Amino acid sequence: MRVDIFSLFPEMFAGPFSSSILKRAVDQGIVNFKIHNIRDYTHDKHHTADDSAYGGGAGMVMKPGPVFEAVETVQAQALDMKDKKVSVILLTPQGRKLTQQMAEDLAKSDWLMLICGHYEGVDERIRQHLATDEISIGDYVLTGGELAAMVIADAVIRLLPGVLGSGESLINESHTGGLLEYPQYTRPEVFRGWAVPEILTSGNHGEIAKWRRRQSIIRTAERRPDMLKVVELNNKEQEIVADLSTQKSNEEDV
Ligand code: ADE
């Protein structure tokens, strides 16, 4: 996958892409990152990338010219990417809120272009005529789209084949399959007097799988009941959820 990031602060990207799993993905040639400074596509002495808003008001707005030129220059130079599936994503708190499903869909792209907006706003024509999608990483406002671009790149790249060591690690994790992950334990079996649930040391894999599924459901019901509205549960599993909510309302009545 090719990932091009367009930013006014390219130096912010040095850390995340040069360590850990993302670095391995780069070293193995699974992903090819390019970070572009939008200011390199300005043509005045001061490299002006933003300007005051038409109609007045406080704050600066990112100019369309340098952003269009940056993205279009990179597209024109990428001769090998013609006919490839490209997503041009504007990072903005006004976008669709990022989910695991969206990360999975984006992982099917050949090419991601991520445009980091400025927190005070970008010229509307960038949204209308350049971006194919707008994504937010949550209902809060960051100083710019840079951290959001890193979050998306991380969430997507770890899904690409060959990036994670073991295929297993993608299968049982939170949000894959619509539930939160079950509780995990490692050695020692007893830590400060707190023991690992007995079932996990029983060696009975069938029972362990059942326990884990049940714990995932309980955990999701307690922490993220909104997720249970879309996940498919069998009758027995629905009973677990119903029992939990009866238990909860009884507790509230006391
Ligand atoms: N830029 C500023 N805040 C953002 C957010 N929450 N998501 C994506 N981009 C942003």
Image (spheres, rainbow, N blue to C red):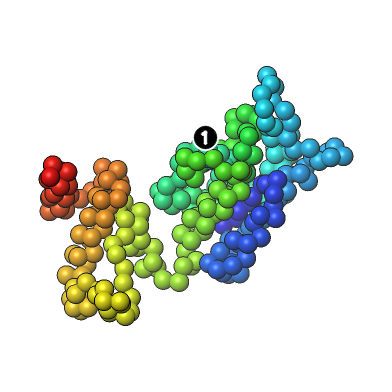
Question: Which residue was labeled with disc 1?
Answer: 94
- Ligand 1 is found in the corner quadrant, namely top right
Q: In the displayed structure, does residue 76 sit left or right of residue 230?
A: right
Q: Residue furthest front?
A: 254
Q: Most extreme residue toward the right, as rendered?
A: 45
* Displayed quadrant of residue 218: bottom left
Please state the horizontal and vertical placement of residue 97, each as a whole percent of the image.
45, 41
Whether the residue under disc 1 has CB within 8 Å of ligand 1: no
Q: Quadrant of residue 230?
A: top left
Image height check: is 170 above or below 83?
A: below
Q: Farthest residue toward the top?
A: 55
Instruction: Indicate the quadrant containing the N terminus: top left, top right, bottom left or bottom right.
Output: bottom right
Quadrant showing the C terminus: top left
User: Would you say 155 lies left or right of 38 here?
Assistant: left
Residue neighbourhood size for the residue with mark 1, other residues' Cα within 10 Å, grouped as few (<14), some (14–19), many (≥20): some
Whether residue 126 is situated above or below residue 75 in the rendered picture: above
Mark 1, secondary structure of its residue: strand
Give x and y (percent) for residue 243: 12, 50
Q: Between residue 42 and residue 12, name the one nearer to us.
A: 12
Please name the residue shown 22% across and 72% down the image.
Answer: 197
Q: Nearer the viewer, residue 171 or 143?
A: 143
The answer to whether residue 76 shows anywhere in this view is no
In the depicted view, which residue is nearer to us: 109 or 217? 217
In this rendering, would 67 be left or right of 202? right
Residue at x 20%, y 50% (from the top left corner): 233
Query: Is the residue 26 above or below the residue 116 in the image?
Result: below
x and y percent of residue 94 in the render? 52, 35
Residue 24 x, y percent position in the rendering:
56, 69
Q: Is residue 239 left or right of residue 139?
A: left
| Residue depicted at x 47% and y 40% | 139
Q: Amino acid at mark 1?
A: Gln
